[in-house]
Image (spheres, rainbow, N blue to C red):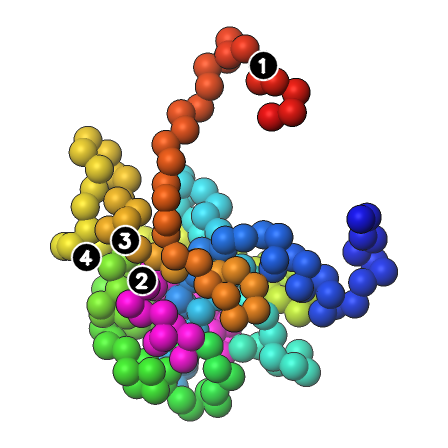
């Protein structure tokens, strides 16, 4: 099967993309409006971009009609946001904050999520999230005709729960202790399962069999 993406509808391209680029980490993005209303919403077009500087990127879709979603408008106006790592136990609350609520709705209160305020940026965060990235807006990128805007945040501070464990001698966070949720397609999410260790081969490693 060979698919020419130009021949597909926007919906078909979305279905194909979101079912092939899996699993995707979920950025549970918290912001505040210029009027001071807290906002919380999940986005799965999310990736690590750079460690130095410490950059993460979130592609935020627009509402039908082209209006920016509340999260995007708040980030552009306030220049700040937090990325909260949602765990298995927070999946129901995370999903509840995905609704398209009016700008005056506080999703923290609506979903029963505890809130606190970041210290390095002007944004709230999920108080019981195991990990939080406090981000200052680094750059926003217009994606042309796409109904999305890429927001790049510079992480100024990382908040880690005392319950998390760092792997000995490193700053690697134990993935199973973190227990993050990931996005698949439609209504499907993925949880952390087996995590096999496969060291990178040396430069002089022999080739693998051709059917590998």
Q: CA distance from mark 3 to mark 1?
A: 36 Å
Find numbered disc 1 in the image and state the secondary structure of the residue it sits on: loop
**Residue occupied by mark 2:** 87
* In contact (CB < 8 Å): disc 3 and disc 2: yes
Of badges 3 and 1, nearer the viewer stands: 1
Density class for disc 3 (Cα within 10 Å; few <14, some 14-19, many ≥20) is: many
> Up-down: is 195 above or below 161?
above
Q: CA distance from mark 4 to mark 1?
A: 43 Å
The dot on residue 178 is 3
Farthest left residue in view: 162
Of badges 2 and 1, nearer the viewer stands: 1
Instruction: Say which label, 2 or 1, has the lower sequence index.
Output: 2
Quarter holding residue 206 = top right
Of badges 2 and 4, nearer the viewer stands: 2
Magenta: main secondary structure:
helix
The dot on residue 207 is 1
**Residue occupied by mark 4:** 161
- The stretch in magenta equals 70-96
Farthest right residue in view: 7
């Amino acid at each position: 099967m060979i698919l020419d993406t130009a021949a597909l509808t926007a919906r078909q391209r979305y279905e194909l993309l979101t079912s092939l680029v899996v699993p995707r980490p979920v950025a549970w993005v918290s912001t505040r409006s210029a009027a001071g209303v807290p906002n919380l919403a999940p986005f799965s077009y999310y990736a690590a971009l750079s460690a130095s500087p410490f950059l993460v990127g979130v592609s935020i879709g627009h509402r039908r009609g082209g209006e920016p979603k509340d999260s995007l408008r708040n980030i552009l106006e306030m220049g700040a946001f937090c990325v909260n790592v949602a765990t298995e136990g927070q999946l129901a609350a995370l999903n509840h904050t995905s609704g398209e609520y009016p700008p005056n709705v506080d999703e923290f209160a609506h979903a029963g999520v505890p809130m606190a305020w970041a210290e390095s940026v002007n944004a709230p965060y999920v108080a019981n999230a195991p990990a939080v990235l406090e981000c200052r807006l680094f750059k926003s990128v217009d994606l042309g005709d796409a109904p999305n805007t890429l927001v790049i945040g510079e992480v100024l501070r990382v908040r880690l729960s005392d319950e998390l464990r760092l792997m000995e001698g490193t700053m690697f966070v134990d993935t199973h202790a973190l227990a993050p949720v990931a996005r698949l397609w439609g209504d499907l999410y993925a949880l952390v399962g087996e995590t096999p260790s496969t060291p990178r081969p040396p430069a002089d490693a022999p080739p693998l069999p051709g059917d590998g």
